[in-house]
Image (cartoon, helix red, strand yellow):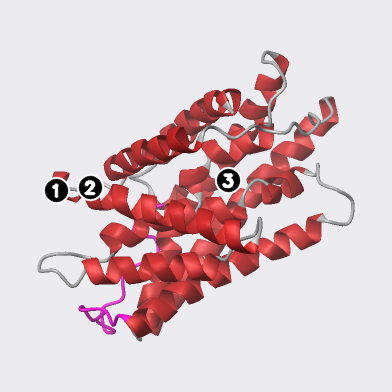
Amino acid sequence: AWLEMLVAFFVGVLAGAIHFGTLRSQRLDLQKSFLAAFLGTLVALAFTFVLPPFNAARALFGGATLLVPAMVVTLGSMELATGAVEAGLPRLMYGLLRFLMLGVGFAAAGTLWRFAWPLPPPVEAHALPPLLTFFLVAVGGVALSVCMSGRPRDVAWIVGGVLIAYETQAVTKMVLGDRGSPLVAAFVLGVAGLLYGRGRGRMPMTVIMPGMLQLAPGFIGTQAVVALLGAGVAGADDDRLFNVLLVALQLVLGLVFATVVVPPRFSVERDSPVPPSAGGA
């Protein structure tokens, strides 16, 4: 696991440099998703030449986590749940397009790599101790507060959203198996965020957004990346990619059901939709 974390760090630095280096140009918003996935894949695969055997797909996905358009999907889901179809539907479609660009980047890099070398064989990754994992997730929540430009007073709530998502995800996987239940996890996270948003001067997205950034990669896992790289088991790749779409749908439905149980305190103005690219990653 330590080797995967090391490689994920370098992939993440590369992805972050591309992301923040192109923030001023909305025209490159989709292209940067492809470019970061493409170059990140090549970097992760290149490390297999200089490091002991490690799970390259897991390292790659760990480094590219922030590129998953969880924020866009979250905002779109909340807007649909509150009746702002004009803003929510384009945002969801934009998030799907961003995800497809990531997939194309992974697939293109895997195809290019196989022209010169075979893809590295899968290596079983060993999990870190639970307490250490919990601590690292919390540290990641602090890092997310920086990426989200969160206010100092919101850092604890952002970390709380990440930990709620992580623990709910872990419990559903313990009860229901490896796939868990994205719908239940998103529902619990949505209820927690909406309850937080009932306070004065608070927004539900402070808790929901970082939690979704934890849930989306956590449930999608590395199997989709393995399939996109072309290293999956024969006949299973289509199922894995279809499962990715099912996970995305369940995350959206979980948030929608949460708004039924805890109606949002705010209302979305239908006459002034927000551009679909707003809202971060």
Task: Identify which amino acid the numbered label 2 is placed on.
Answer: Ala
The picture places residue 55, in percent across and down from the top left corner, at 68, 31
How crowded pointer 2 is (Cα within 10 Å; few <14, some 14-19, many 20+) is rated as: some
The answer to whether the residue labelled 2 contacts the one labelled 1, judged by CB atoms less than 8 Å apart, is yes
What residue is shown with label 1? 153
Task: Identify which amino acid the numbered label 1 is placed on.
Answer: Arg
How crowded pointer 3 is (Cα within 10 Å; few <14, some 14-19, many 20+) is rated as: many
How crowded pointer 1 is (Cα within 10 Å; few <14, some 14-19, many 20+) is rated as: few
Label 3 or label 2, whichever comes before in sequence order = 3
The picture places residue 261, in percent across and down from the top left corner, at 35, 83
Q: Is residue 132 visible?
A: yes
In the displayed structure, 63 sits above or below 267; it is above
Kindly identify the residue that appears in the image at 72 percent across and 21 percent down. 53
Q: Secondary structure at mark 2?
A: helix
Q: Secondary structure at mark 3?
A: helix
Q: Which mark is residue 34?
A: 3
